[in-house]
Image (cartoon, rainbow, N blue to C red):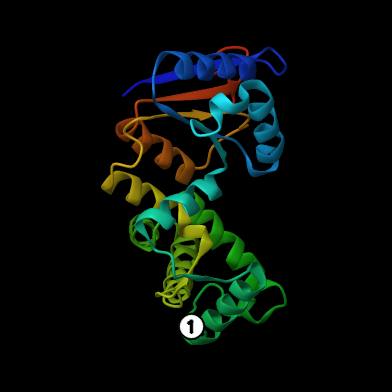
């Protein structure tokens, strides 16, 4: 297990350094490399890798995004029979959750009848999942806060979040849960024990993505992460 951080301002050669690392791995070992980039960069990165390493990298270096990595892992260890819903369908499920909870809501009782409320709740649930915030964590916060208005808000969100999650039982699944499930699968199975993992071109990481990186640190030969920064000192909120 090892972690290497390559940092610098934009256009200072971080990706070039990643390619140098890949070249060294290919020439000095039989290990594989997973090059993880944001989805919008995956096609161009595949072209760059192909042009740089040609046939040497065909079966040794693979370019993926977090989403495609999840698909690859699920194809190997499951689940592979899930039906996924788009955002519009999931907002409809939130609307059904609101209807089911309508008599129980305290703070959002009147707001729940307004246009667009379901979209706001869905955005909140999506944010919760990206940051690994569970129903139990929200419930605990609700019971331990001394702010009355916040307590009732959180209690209502717990009801809606919990009701929404009830819709997702196999063969149905929520794509917003994929990275959390991915981390669990990587933790359980030895899929990358002879693989180096490189994360490049990310401006930041969600809590779900950081969890995936955390388990890959334990389950792979090494992890390399590029960060856009002039130094690693935390100076302010920017």
Query: In the figure, 189 relative to 112: above or below?
Result: above
The part of the image, by quadrant, that contains residue 25 is: top left
| Residue appearing at x 44%, y 70% in the figure | 81
Q: Residue furthest front?
A: 55
- Dot 1 falls on a residue whose secondary structure is helix
| Residue appearing at x 43%, y 29% in the figure | 32
Query: In the figure, 90 relative to 103: above or below?
Result: above
Q: Quadrant of the N terminus?
A: top left
Q: Which residue, given by chain and number where applicable, does mark 1 sit on?
A: 101
Q: Nearer the viewer, residue 218 or 58?
A: 58
Q: Nearer the viewer, residue 234 or 32?
A: 32
| Residue appearing at x 48%, y 30% in the figure | 60
- Residue 122: x and y, percent? 59, 66
Query: In the figure, 194 relative to 119: above or below?
Result: above
Is residue 20 visible in the rendered image? The answer is yes
| Residue appearing at x 35%, y 56% in the figure | 77
Give the side of residue 48 with respect to residue 174, left or right. Answer: right
Q: Nearer the viewer, residue 41 or 33?
A: 33
């Amino acid at each position: 297990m090892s972690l290497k951080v390559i940092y610098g301002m934009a256009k200072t050669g971080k990706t070039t350094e990643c390619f140098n690392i890949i070249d060294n791995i290919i020439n000095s070992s039989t290990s594989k490399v997973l090059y993880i980039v944001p989805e919008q960069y995956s096609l161009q990165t595949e072209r760059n890798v192909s042009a740089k390493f040609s046939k040497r990298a065909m079966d040794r270096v693979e370019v993926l995004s977090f989403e495609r990595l999840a698909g690859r892992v699920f194809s190997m260890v499951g689940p592979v029979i899930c039906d996924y819903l788009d955002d519009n369908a999931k907002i409809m499920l939130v609307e059904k959750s609101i209807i089911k909870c309508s008599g129980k809501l305290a703070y959002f009782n009147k707001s729940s009848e307004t246009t667009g409320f379901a979209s706001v709740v869905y955005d909140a649930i999506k944010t919760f999942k990206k940051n690994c915030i569970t129903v139990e964590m929200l419930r605990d916060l609700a019971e331990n806060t001394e702010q009355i208005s916040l307590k009732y808000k959180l209690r209502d969100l717990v009801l809606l979040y919990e009701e929404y999650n009830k819709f997702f039982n196999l063969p149905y699944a929520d794509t917003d849960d994929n990275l959390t499930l991915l981390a669990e699968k990587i933790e359980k199975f030895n899929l990358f024990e002879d693989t180096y993992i490189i994360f490049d071109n990310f401006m930041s990481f969600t809590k779900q993505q950081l969890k995936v990186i955390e388990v890959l640190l334990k389950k792979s030969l090494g992890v390399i992460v590029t960060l856009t920064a002039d130094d690693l000192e935390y100076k302010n909120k920017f």
